[in-house]
Amino acid sequence: MKYPHSVNIIGGGLAGSEAAWQLANANVPVIIHEMRPLKSTEAHKTKTLSELVCSNSFRSDDFVNNAVGVLHQELRLANSLIMFCADKCKIPAGGALAVDRENFSQMVEEKINAHELIQIKRTEINQLSKLTNDNETIIATGPLTSSSLANDIIKQTGESSLAFFDAIAPIIYFDSINMNIAWFQSRYDKGSGKDYINCPLSKEQYYNFINDLLNSKKIEFKNWEKTTPYFEGCMPIEIMAKRGLETLRHGPMKPFGLTNSNDINNKPYAVIQLRQDNSIGSLWNIVGFQTKMTYEEQKRVFKTIPGLENAKFARLGGLHRNTFINSPKLLNKNLCLKSNPNIYFAGQITGVEGYVESASIGLIAGVFIAFKKKQESIIYPPNQTALGSLLNHITRNADKETFQPMNINFGLFPDVQSKEINGQKINKINRRQMLSSQALHQSKIWSQKINKLLKNI
Ligand SMILES: Cc1cc2nc3c(=O)[nH]c(=O)nc-3n(C[C@H](O)[C@H](O)[C@H](O)COP(=O)(O)OP(=O)(O)OC[C@H]3O[C@@H](n4cnc5c(N)ncnc54)[C@H](O)[C@@H]3O)c2cc1C
């Protein structure tokens, strides 16, 4: 049965194209509203759908040891258009899945054009009210959403719910932090007592650290990023450090209200704090440490922090133009606004980061609306899957006060139950492989169910 009312999708990028494909294959007609080529963004160069604006890599394709590889495989199981085209346009890149970018977006465009239930309208949508009525609308306009639509989203959701800069502080895996040096404590003992992890610095360590920050290699802003409003709250640490040697010690590195429980008699000269980043406590972000240092420099400089000498980074810091909503505050688990069940969001604008993650949220949004159209209860991707972990992170597990965009990583997955195999303690490699195999097993079952229920595959 074909459903009478079309779903509107604003934005024909990775998320919008994937959502359209999932809906159309479930017999739900779709209209994609894409503003290019009439109006372009600062980064897109072509008029084709799903243009890859920067790198041509979908990152690691290793679905045994790498979380993004698991996500690739789950997308394949769920009949993803983006993964189908990426596999077809693959070029040699070692363990990574890299594509010929022109062939890739050309193929996505051809597939979408050929689908009888998908219509493409080349137009900029600047007001949601023009579309919504009683039909579902997916907003998949990405990190470079046009400003008129961004303003309308602010009207719908409130000023503080839409960010224009992605001020990313690095995130570290808990099990790589040396707790013989670092300690749990909230400033002035507020909160539960385990809200922050603190790393102590002596006077000499502090000045060496500032020196390292000032002399490290940085990534430059692109021209169009320079004209985007710059918020004091997103100030990179190295720019703060330039204002004076003591500035950071009176800002994010202040030592006040803290006592080092590993060394009670020694008052640190400065303290670097990490705040829990996910509800299971496997990931911790360095508070106030957004930075434009290159990735290599971040790894080098941050590993000089006492307690972080063996730090493993789930994500490195950065600062660039990126429009995204506060999903844990605004969206329910179905990816629609809590305040309006017909307005859905998908892709990078939901606060995921990366091509594969954006396509994944597009796939999930498409599947969820197909369930709604069929008047069936939604079957959610299981918590153990990469798709489920990403969805849970942006809609529930992430802290809405500090929400920042996120790549898929094993820290988002619920941990494995058992701590031992055959009497041996599970090491990190075993743990990742167990998480991957559990995710793919559950994902297979989920995909079979949705393919049968929604798409008669
Ligand atoms: C400069 C830059 C570089 C990036 N590099 C990488 C990278 O190397 N690797 C990586 O994995 N990720 C990268 N990303 C992050 C992100 O994964 C990609 O931007 C990805 O394309 C996001 O997918 P999406 O579908 O959410 O948005 P997009 O792919 O950007 O698609 C959104 C679409 O919406 C359209 N649109 C916007 N506003 C309107 C409107 N009002 N009406 C109609 N259409 C509209 C746009 O024209 C666009 O086609 C980068 C982001 C940026 C900004």
Image (cartoon, rainbow, N blue to C red):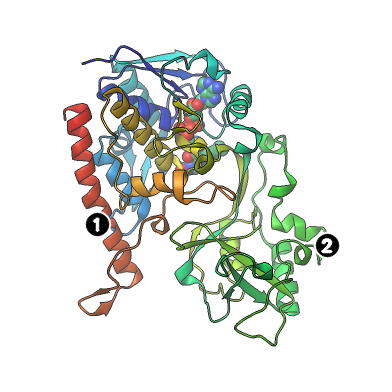
Residue 115 drawn at (x, y percent): 29, 18
The residue depicted at 32 percent of the width and 35 percent of the height is 89
Can you tell which quarter of the image residue 380 is in? top left
Horizontal side, residue 276 vs residue 83: left or right: right
Q: Is residue 66 above or below residue 176?
A: above
Quarter placement of the N terminus: top left
The residue depicted at 60 percent of the width and 67 percent of the height is 302
Question: How dense is the environment of label 2, judged by Cα within 10 Å: few (below 14), some, or many (20 and up)?
Answer: few
The residue depicted at 34 percent of the width and 46 percent of the height is 388
Disc with the residue nearer the chain's start (2 vs 1): 2
The kind of residue on which mark 1 rests is Ser
176, 28: nearer the viewer: 28
Q: Residue furthest right?
A: 244
Q: Is residue 246 above or below residue 126?
A: below
The residue depicted at 29 percent of the width and 29 percent of the height is 371
Question: How dense is the environment of label 1, judged by Cα within 10 Å: few (below 14), some, or many (20 and up)?
Answer: some
16, 390: nearer the viewer: 390
Where does label 1 land, which residue?
A: 437
Q: Secondary structure at mark 1?
A: helix
26, 52: nearer the viewer: 26
Labels in figure, total: 2
The kind of residue on which mark 2 rests is Gly
Residue 342 drawn at (x, y percent): 44, 24
Where does label 2 land, which residue?
A: 244
Query: Are the two marked residues, 2 and 1, in contact with CB atoms closer than 8 angstroms?
Result: no
Quarter placement of the C terminus: top left
- Residue 52 visible, this orientation: no
